[in-house]
Image: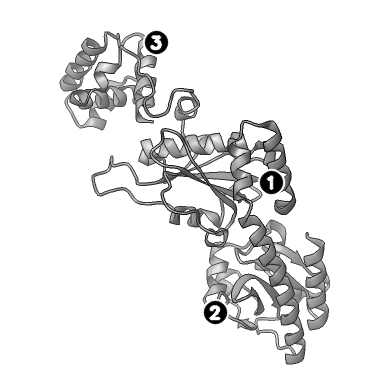
Amino acid sequence: MNADYQDLVDEISALLGAPATLEDRDFRLIAFGAHDSEDAGAMDPVRTRSILTRRSTTEVRAWFERFGITTAAGPVRIPADPAAGVLRGRLCLPVRHRGTVYGYVWLLAADDSVPALPERALDAAMAVCGRIGTQLADEARARADLGPRLNTLLTSDSDERRASALATLSAPLGGGGPYGLVCVAPWQAPVPGVRTVPGASVLTLVPVPGASGPRLAVLVRLSAGGELGPAHGAVRALLGTGPGGGAGAAPLRAAGLSTPVRSLADLPAAWREASAAARAALARPHLGPVAEWSAIGPYRLLAALPDSGPGHPVDPAVSPLLAPAHAELARTAEVFLDCAGQAGRTATALNIHRQTLYYRLSRVEQLTGLDLHEGEDRLLLHMSLKAARL
């Protein structure tokens, strides 16, 4: 825990005579006061989970936000809600700076009532909350200025510049991971502020030569288990929706999530994973709208190939099949290979008669000169069709 925040939380606990916890506006634990193990009223499942996992659930957050804590300027009294695991009443002290909420200080009652505390003590505690808010706001501004540094770390060819960027990022972000990188592609709008993307630590825009638009890189701190957690909804909010052109229509935007990394030094590799996952989700909408690199199958390999971007070379044998006039044959071949060459499954997936399938496959062999009974010919055709989607 940050020592400065710990001292401030201990100060509030002393003023109010009760253990307090401090969470940021995304309900991630920052610091907590000491709890007397003999005090049965000091804990409930929500507080226990917050301390053990360093975050609250979406259901708990929704319950608390119903009482206006995101806009309140003073203490908010919140009753118990056993259905949400909130067994004890709470007093919430919003942590604000210049009208913006940056976090919350929480105090529990000894039962399901709401803590009743002297107004003078509450005023003093709110003054401490103001000091916390100033510090959190300063840190938020520092993170907002880190975008160019993240961009350098992800894209620079200079070891020296990457090392400098890494050193600048390490101090304000602090601690180890797990971190995740999210790539949103394509991105045409200005870079959103860190405060508008819950769970985001840094955002930057990464131009990609030859792509349909730049990509938005979002650095997030993942849960202990490596999940995107509360930031997942915010990432989805950044995405567009596909046009109403049928189930196969590509989305306007997609997002890719890298595998978790423990060190900021591993972010360049994570960015390659996130970019590949976003491209795969654009090519195959069923993988998205937020595709994880670990779940995109053959696209993990194809997206890593040097010439796998727009305008990439196509094998001359497969090139005739990729002409617009043969789109139905190409789709038939891809579904056939996706179904491991099983005619019955393929015919069912395409909703066609087996004889129609056999005719189409013979036309594919005539156009390409490939033998679909040969494993290496199948592999060439399958990978070529998947690469074309990217």
Q: Is residue 178 above or below residue 350?
A: below
| Image location (x, y in percent) of residue 332 | 25, 25
Q: Mark 3 or mark 2: which comes first in sequence?
A: 2
- Mark 1 touches mark 3? (CB < 8 Å): no
Q: Confirm whether residue 45 shows in the render.
A: no
Q: Mark 1 or mark 2: which comes first in sequence?
A: 2
Amino acid type at image mark 2: Phe
**In this rendering, the label closer to the viewer, 1 or 3:** 1
Q: Residue at position x 34%, y 51% from top?
A: 241
Amino acid type at image mark 3: Glu
How many angstroms separate mark 1 from mark 3 (CA)?
42 Å
Numbered tag placed on residue 177 in the rendering:
1
How many angstroms separate mark 1 from mark 2 (CA)?
33 Å
| Image location (x, y in percent) of residue 344 | 26, 24
| Image location (x, y in percent) of residue 280 | 42, 35
Numbered tag placed on residue 319 in the rendering:
none
Q: Residue at position x 55%, y 59% from top?
A: 198
Q: Residues within 10 Å of mark 3 (few under 14, many from 20)?
A: few
Work out whether residue 7 or residue 142 is closer to the camera in this orientation and state it. 142
Work out whether residue 56 or residue 289 is closer to the camera in this orientation and state it. 289
**In this rendering, the label closer to the viewer, 1 or 2:** 1
Left-right relation of 279 to 58: left
- Residue that label 2 marks: 67
- Residue that label 3 marks: 376
Q: Residues within 10 Å of mark 1 (few under 14, many from 20)?
A: some
Q: Secondary structure at mark 1?
A: loop
How many angstroms separate mark 3 from mark 2 (CA)?
63 Å
| Image location (x, y in percent) of residue 18 | 78, 78
